[in-house]
Amino acid sequence: GAAVEQQLEGLRAQLAAVVAERDRLASQLAEAEGRLRSEAAEADQLASQLRGQVTSGEGEVSSQRGRISVNLLDKILFPSGSAALSPGGKQVLNRVGKVLKEIRNKQIIVGGHTDDVATRPEMFPTNWELSALRAVNVVRYLQESVRVDARRLTAAGYSQFHPISKNRARNRRIEILLL
């Protein structure tokens, strides 16, 4: 009698608590899915804006799982073997920078990449120095001339150790990652 009734009441209370917890978790999941859809839509829109600023001869924009990458060919940005930005490179960075300047919720990592051909040692001891200085010069230009928030900028040199192709020219690039 009474003991079974009491046990049943306890089980009903536990079931109600489990159902309430399930409903709370379902609500959290729906919220998180909504945020993810919103972030994905935002990333797609951002990638689309960046694609509008980069011609196929200058580089390419890709977007995967909210991570946006802008690869710019080195020959567009720098004279051969140099880390100084060319006038054409500044024009491309002005266009891309217009979009980057408006972004508030992402870090911008500028990576310099080279091929595996040795540098002229009198200019750059190795490809590490060339890739790093190119990245630094892009970051400085974005900060000083385009006015991108410096707190969101990072410069990184990758030398020849992150190739994306067997084609050497494609490996010589500046990659702007938005994370």
Image (cartoon, rainbow, N blue to C red):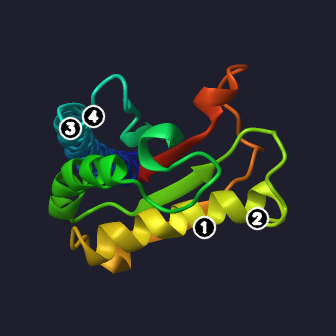
Does residue 16 show up?
no
> Of helix, strand and loop, which one carries label 2?
loop
Q: Amino acid at mark 1?
A: Leu
Along the line of sight, which residue is nearer the eye, 3 or 31? 31
Q: Amino acid at mark 2?
A: Phe
Q: CA distance from mark 2 to mark 3?
A: 31 Å
| Residue 43 position by quadrant | top left
Residue drawn 50% across the image and 62% down it: 84
> Of helix, strand and loop, which one carries label 3?
loop
In terms of sequence position, does the residue under pointer 1 or pointer 4 come before the other?
4
> Of helix, strand and loop, which one carries label 1?
helix
Q: Amino acid at mark 4?
A: Val
Judge whether 117 appears above or below 64 on screen.
below
Label pair 2/1, CB-CB below 8 angstroms: yes
The residue beneath circle 2 is: 124
Along the line of sight, which residue is nearer the eye, 19 or 3? 19
Residue 67 locus on image (x, y percent): 41, 42
The residue beneath circle 3 is: 53
Mark whose residue sits in front, 2 or 1 = 2
Badge 3, how many Cα within 10 Å: few under 14, some, many 20+? many
- Looking at the rendering, in which quadrant would you find the N terminus? top left
In terms of sequence position, does the residue under pointer 2 or pointer 3 come before the other?
3
Judge whether 70 appears above or below 124 on screen.
above
Q: CA distance from mark 4 to mark 3?
A: 4 Å
The residue beneath circle 1 is: 133
Residue drawn 69% across the image and 27% down it: 168
